[in-house]
Image (cartoon, helix red, strand yellow):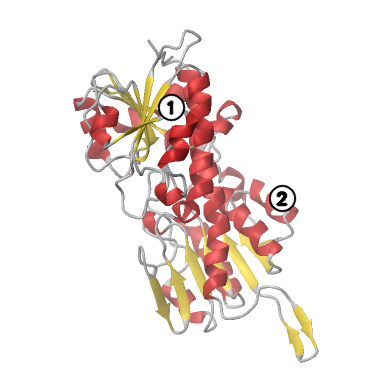
Amino acid sequence: MALKIAVLKETAEFEGRVATTPETIKKYIAKGFSVSVVSGAGLHASYIDSEFEAAGATLAPDNDKAAKDADIILCVQSPAELPRMKKGALLVGMLSPYNNPQKISSFAQADVTAISMELVPRITRAQAMDVLSSQSNLAGYKAVLDAASLYTRAFPMMMTAAGTIAPARVFVMGAGVAGLQAIATAKRLGAIVSATDVRPAAKEQVQSLGASFVMVESEEMKQAETAGGYAKEMSDDFKQKQAALVAETLVKQDIVITTALIPGRPAPVLVTESMVRSMKPGSIIVDLAVEQGGNCALSRPGEIVEINGVKIIGYLNVPSRVATDASSLYARNLLNLLGILVNKDGELSLDMEDDIVKASVLTKDGQIVHPNFQ
């Protein structure tokens, strides 16, 4: 019997994405799956029910009905209330285990095999499943546009008969996927761009995009990256030196975009209150880490704060602000992951020795199996 996939309607506030698209539904059906999508699940991402039906999916009235006899349940964020799922069903989504440890227990109690997409390791074989990269890429792009929408001047240099307009100066803090896309987008808009990151490998990447690199040179920088490609937390001495350099740099900037995150930890504060107050009126700060506590000391989740004429943007769930493309990329990430979870006979087969599976499975057989959450 064909495995049944259920796609849930998202319940989280500010969530406009959906876990499948007509494109991926067609591919699931070609592989022998049946697909059920909750009616209205794709509306905020501009995917309407008739498109899902045309691709071969059936519609369900609500999450409970969709999930009750499904073998695989796909979501973007963990649902506020778990739908009724059969024992042993596979739940796959961005389950935010570090922020929702109580949810992990509920998955185990429901005897659901839960896979958290954020935990997929950053290895070559898993690149096509890397949701942090696919979603952060769009967040970095949107952050620049959000800044531009509130900035009261132009980004590029403009030479007119009435005089010359100077280009905007953009400073990107954190040169991971979001930061690099922010750099590229700001450059395309004509800004003068600089960036900083604690990882030495980022210097070449930043410069390759035409931005200048701002960093305290030290021996500690050489060990500033984990094996998984994430930034490590630095020593207090390094932080003080870096803060002094950043403070000196911020005074000259028009727009600052902060993107620094440490998995499982609060976001590091990179922009202090005194730094904000040193910036020119009309400057913009976009804090992409606001949901993890924020890189800016004065940012507030879901708000735009103004301090002495400096606007601090703390929008929540920025990838969802580009919901159509974010859904498309996320749906492909899920499709690629399921490709290693289903064997050639069309049966669920989780190899717990596989690096990707082992790193991302939270619960199985009624137990919490991930070592980080036991």
Packing grade of label 1 (10 A; few <14, some 14-19, many >=20) is many
Work out whether residue 11 or residue 234 is closer to the camera in this orientation and state it: 11
Work out whether residue 263 or residue 35 is closer to the camera in this orientation and state it: 35
Packing grade of label 2 (10 A; few <14, some 14-19, many >=20) is few
Q: Which residue is mark 2?
A: 204
Residue visible at 58% across and 48% down in the picture: 177
Residue visible at 19% across and 26% down in the picture: 109
Question: Furthest residue to the left?
Answer: 109
Tell me the quarter of the picture where residue 111 sits: top left
Q: Earlier in the sequence, mark 2 or mark 1?
A: 2
Residue visible at 52% across and 27% down in the picture: 26
Q: Please state the horizontal and vertical placement of residue 366, each as a whole percent of the image.
A: 23, 20
Residue 359's tag is: 1
Question: SS at mark 1?
Answer: helix
Residue visible at 45% across and 36% down in the picture: 52
Question: SS at mark 2?
Answer: helix
- Observer-side mark, 2 or 1, equals 1
Question: Furthest residue to the top?
Answer: 345
Mark 2 belongs to which amino acid?
Answer: Glu
Q: Is residue 128 left or right of residue 40?
A: right
Distance of mark 2 from mark 1, alpha carbons? 30 Å
Mark 1 belongs to which amino acid?
Answer: Ala
